[in-house]
Image: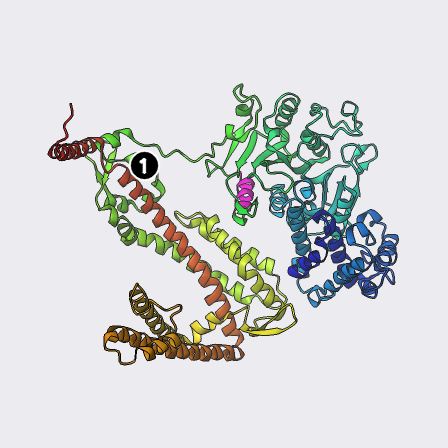
């Protein structure tokens, strides 16, 4: 489905900027979805009314017509607007704009092709089998992300990366347990609405959503986004929130249970249409933000929009934590109020509109007076590169959320609760810059001068692996002994044997067995859940359950970060398991091979063999045809050996005057021609022997190639035919045990190997660093100098 949607972009992208063509593609997705879902609805009051003649089917009838653009505007879009009070003309693009779509035939062809793409069977939403998992909403988010990426810095503001949205939605503490239909959530700068929808997803039910967005077109995107995510009653209004807030109760701002926002960073025009000193909503009683820096203006609006027990989270640039003057005054009031519950520092370059690092300010009015400090997290180091941007991984999101929810201080260079007294201390003076309170820098690798002078490895460096020695105390004693002076040790084994000593030590083996036992216990517990997943199941629920149990299980694993293990599962889910789960949800535990047919530009088709997505061929071969595979591998090894011999002969006899010296290309035809040419020439006996040797090897190679090809074809046919014989139980075993859990077991083994490699690498580095103390270096230099001097004297060179 995603590739089909992206193909629709290709129909348009040649003529316009991404920020423009996204409007056309997203509208097409919208009209197709509401047509499939509501055009023939029997509901008394469907969320979207589609008048006769205004559905996607009616759009199909316009394909190829010279006035297709005008008809889409007048017969499809306008009646929709007239029938639905929540939709406005400004929500939709102009389908008759020659500047964007081309003129005459170019426009007709482009719009006809665009309509055709949305006719594809995979975009039939009448039987949306993954409705609970919101696959359509996910597709919309996918497009939004790509459009934001393509739009460049100036136009990326309509989309907050979904990973950041998820963090915000989770840290405000909303959940199914504390929400009902009357629960309210608000975003004063809602963009395309993705942040509000993430909050709704965490709530797990249809709560009341309201949002305001200054850009009229983006507000339209948000309204469509809400409908596509099955929140048609969400209230999204256009307008400038600071100058003209639309959500009011009487003369006051409306207040909400939850407020979330990603306002424009350092908005330089925030005072447009507004006189802050005479604000009728009393938002600036703590102080007026600088005229060219609107960050605190949005924050103060959010605080005023929170109920007495309201929760909020806002993304702002790091500058709000430390900038002086007017902002310092507001910041002091913010801290003293107790409303600021926490600060989460994010990595740089996450957002499409800017590369600067940002932070999340978490606000909570409940129990604000009793709050004793601000919980700070420096999560700036946890990310992965994704093209030219950075992105939070699943483990980064989970770690932030878990740490914040538990107010967990077990990661010293990551998070801590900072008391108000420390913040108010003269040396800090309400400066909230995270490095003042959390030193997240990596400790320096300091060289020990005494060890360089006198030898020995500093115990301080060995103590850095305290967690390893706590788990394996005997290993330390096996590796090190005293260097004969306090504070220094030396290796008891040669440097080359350090790795073998660690990996072969009983305590290291016991450690790996302990971790493996945890995995085995988790595997035993989770297998029924995986095997029990079936047709009609919900993949997101499945991975939620499986991943949380894995994370919980590995909290008890020594020397491993449970979030690293969790990330392996989430990476594999994104790479393979997710697709498998959707296949099973659609068709059940069925594995059928399908032909791979490629069509070239001329329309010619070519059969490229067969494949099975759920159970690829190697899994069938490994389980059922191991003997045949071994025979094929053996024959392949013979072939490789002969090929290698041929290469050796050619290399050995390709020099000047050698057997293959005059050959343009060495092949059987040319070698045979040369053999005929030589005939019985007695002077060419050696050359003839080489040529005959090459021909013999070449003949063997040809026979082996044929044999390998035949064995491979036989094995391919055996595997193909075996799919039809598989029972459901066998399919489950192949998928769950051989494919999914075997991959995760291999990933875990990689984590265990990393523990041994890290310890080995550091011990070798320390041993080599201090292997030659200064006195020995001096002695070696003296010996070498004497040798050089002796050589020079023998050569008659002397100097004073």
Decide which of 387, 43 is in the foreground and name it: 387
Q: Is residue 401 magenta?
A: yes
Query: Which quadrant does the C terminus fall into?
Result: top left
Decide which of 457, 249 is in the foreground and name it: 457
Q: Quadrant of residue 173?
A: top right
Q: Which residues are magenta?
A: 396-407
With 14 as the anchor, is 533 left or right in this view? Answer: left
Q: Is residue 747 magenta?
A: no
With 643 as the anchor, is 726 left or right in this view? Answer: right
Q: Residue drawn 48% across and 61% down?
A: 525
Image coordinates for residue 623, horizontal then vertical, percent = 43, 73
Image coordinates for residue 731, horizontal then vertical, percent = 52, 72
Q: Quadrant of residue 705?
A: bottom left
Q: How many residues crowd mark 1 within 10 Å: few (<14), some (14–19), many (20+)?
A: some
Q: Is residue 54 above or below residue 687?
A: above
Query: What colouring style does the render use?
Result: rainbow
Query: Which quadrant does the N terminus fall into?
Result: bottom right
Q: Residue drawn 67% across and 57% down?
A: 6
Decide which of 261, 218 is in the foreground and name it: 218
Q: Residue drawn 25% across and 48% down?
A: 496
Report the residue marked by disc 1. 461
With 3 as the anchor, is 36 left or right in this view? Answer: right
| Residue 203 appears anywhere in the view | no
């Amino acid at each position: 489905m995603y590739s089909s949607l992206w193909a629709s972009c290709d129909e348009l992208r040649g003529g316009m900027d991404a920020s423009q063509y996204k409007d056309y593609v997203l509208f097409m997705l919208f009209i197709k979805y509401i047509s499939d879902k509501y055009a023939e609805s029997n509901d008394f009051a469907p969320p979207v009314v589609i008048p006769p003649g205004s559905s996607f089917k009616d759009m199909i009838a316009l394909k190829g017509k010279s006035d297709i653009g005008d008809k889409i505007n007048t017969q499809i879009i306008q009646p929709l607007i007239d029938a639905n009070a929540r939709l406005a003309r400004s929500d939709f693009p102009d389908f008759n704009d020659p500047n964007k779509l081309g003129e005459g035939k170019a426009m007709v062809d482009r719009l006809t092709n665009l309509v055709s793409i949305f006719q594809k069977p995979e975009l039939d939403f009448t039987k949306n089998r993954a409705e609970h998992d919101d696959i359509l909403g996910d597709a919309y988010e996918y497009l939004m992300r790509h459009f934001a990426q393509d739009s460049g810095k100036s136009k990326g503001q309509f989309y907050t990366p979904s990973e950041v949205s998820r963090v915000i939605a989770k840290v405000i503490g909303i959940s199914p347990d504390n929400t009902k239909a009357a629960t309210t959530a608000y975003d004063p700068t809602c963009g395309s609405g993705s942040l509000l929808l993430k909050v709704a997803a965490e709530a797990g039910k249809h709560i009341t959503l309201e949002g305001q967005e200054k850009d009229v077109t983006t507000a339209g995107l948000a309204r469509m986004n809400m409908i596509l995510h099955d929140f048609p009653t969400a209230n999204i209004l256009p307008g400038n929130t600071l100058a003209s807030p639309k959500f009011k109760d009487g003369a006051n701002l409306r207040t909400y249970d939850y407020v979330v926002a990603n306002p424009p960073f350092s908005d330089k025009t925030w005072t447009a249409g507004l006189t802050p000193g005479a604000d009728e909503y009393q938002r600036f009683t703590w102080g007026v933000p600088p005229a060219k820096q609107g960050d605190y203006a949005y924050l103060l609006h959010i605080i005023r929009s929170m109920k007495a027990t309201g929760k909020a989270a806002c993304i702002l640039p790091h500058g709000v934590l430390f900038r002086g003057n007017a902002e310092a005054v507001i910041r002091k009031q913010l801290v003293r109020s107790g409303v600021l519950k926490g600060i989460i520092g994010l990595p740089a370059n996450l957002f499409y509109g800017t590369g600067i690092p940002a932070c999340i300010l978490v606000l909570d009015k409940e129990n604000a007076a009793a709050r004793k400090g601000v919980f700070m997290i420096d999560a700036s180091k946890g990310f992965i590169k994704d093209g030219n941007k950075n992105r939070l991984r699943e483990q980064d999101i989970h770690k932030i959320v878990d740490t914040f929810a538990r107010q967990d201080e077990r990661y010293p260079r990551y998070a801590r609760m900072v008391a108000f007294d420390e913040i108010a201390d003269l040396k800090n003076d309400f400066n909230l810059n995270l490095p003042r309170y959390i030193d997240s820098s990596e400790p320096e690798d300091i060289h020990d001068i005494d060890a360089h002078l006198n030898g020995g490895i500093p115990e301080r460096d060995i103590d850095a692996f305290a967690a390893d020695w706590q788990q394996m105390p005997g290993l330390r004693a096996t590796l090190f002994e005293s260097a004969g002076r306090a504070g220094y040790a030396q290796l008891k084994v040669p440097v080359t044997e350090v790795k073998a000593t660690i990996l072969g030590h009983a305590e290291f083996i016991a450690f790996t067995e302990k971790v493996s036992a945890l995995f085995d216990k988790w595997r035993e517990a989770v297998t029924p859940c995986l095997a029990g997943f079936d047709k009609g199941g919900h993949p997101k629920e499945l991975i939620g359950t499986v991943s949380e149990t894995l994370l919980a299980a590995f909290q008890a694993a020594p020397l491993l970060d449970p979030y690293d293990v969790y990330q392996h599962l989430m990476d594999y889910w994104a790479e393979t398991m997710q697709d498998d789960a959707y296949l099973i949800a659609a068709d059940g535990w069925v594995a059928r091979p399908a032909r791979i047919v490629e069509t070239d530009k001329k329309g010619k088709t070519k059969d490229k063999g067969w494949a099975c997505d759920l159970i690829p061929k190697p899994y069938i071969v490994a389980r059922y045809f191991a003997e045949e595979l071994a025979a094929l591998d053996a024959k392949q090894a013979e072939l490789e050996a002969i090929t290698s011999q041929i290469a050796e002969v050619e290399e050995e006899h390709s020099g000047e005057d050698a057997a293959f010296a005059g050959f343009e290309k060495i092949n059987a035809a040319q070698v045979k021609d040369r053999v005929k040419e030589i005939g019985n020439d007695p002077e060419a006996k050696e050359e003839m022997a080489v040529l005959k040797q090459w021909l013999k090897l070449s003949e063997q190679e040809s026979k082996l190639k044929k044999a390998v090809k035949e064995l491979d074809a036989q094995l391919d046919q055996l595997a193909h035919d075996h799919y039809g014989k598989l029972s459901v139980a066998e399919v489950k075993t192949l998928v769950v045990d051989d494919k999914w859990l075997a991959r995760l077991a291999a990933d875990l083994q990689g984590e265990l190997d990393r523990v041994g490699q890290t310890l080995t690498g550091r011990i070798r580095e320390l041993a080599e660093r201090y292997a030659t103390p200064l006195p020995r270096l001096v002695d070696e230099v003296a010996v070498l100098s004497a040798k050089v001097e002796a050589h020079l004297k023998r050569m008659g060179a002397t100097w004073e």
